[in-house]
Amino acid sequence: MTYDDTPERLRVLEERVDALTQALRALIDGLEGTPDRNVESDAAARGARLAHELLLSQEVSAQPRAAGP
């Protein structure tokens, strides 16, 4: 790692954290139940699909990326 690529790496990291935050919010919204509202399986499925789509749109995957030079 060089000092020259640090701002770019930070920008990419921030974008990924934002995508993960949005995906987590979608999952929470889909699974969240309140005393006056039970968790519905359709809402949970929609939340899971939205979270997955958000992660795919930001190219955030479970596979680690190869280390650069």
Image: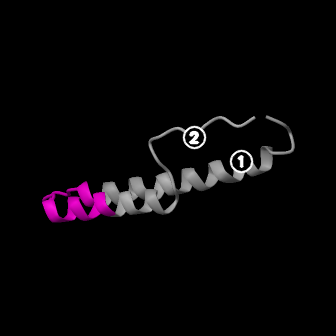
| Apparent side of residue 34 relative to residue 13 in the rendered image (left or right) | left
Query: Left or right of 39: which side holds 52?
Result: right
Q: Nearer the viewer, residue 48 or 66?
A: 66
> At which x and y percent is residue 27?
32, 55
Q: Residue at x 56, y 52 (%)?
A: 16
Q: What residue is at 16 percent from the left and 65 percent from the top? A: 42
Q: Position of residue 20 (x, y in %)?
A: 48, 52
How far across and down, in percent of the image, does residue 39 sit? 16, 58
- Residue type at mark 1 is Leu
Say whether residue 37 is visible. no
Taking the magenta stretch, the answer to whether it contains residue 64 is no
The amino acid pointed to by label 2 is: Arg
Relative to 16, say whether 1 is above or below.
Answer: above
Specify which label sits upstream in the sequence, 2 or 1. 1
Which segment is the magenta one? 30-49
Q: Is residue 58 visible?
A: yes
Q: Label 1 crowding class (10 Å Cα cut-off): few <14, some 14-19, many 20+?
A: few
Q: Nearer the viewer, mark 2 or mark 1?
A: 2
Q: Classify mark 1: helix, strand or loop.
A: helix
Q: Residue at x 75, y 34 (%)?
A: 69
Which quadrant of the structure image shows residue 25? bottom left
Label 2: which secondary element? loop
Quote the CA–CA distance across marks 2 and 1: 15 Å
Give the residue at mark 2: 65
Query: Mark 1 = which residue?
Result: 10
Identify the disc placed on residue 52: none
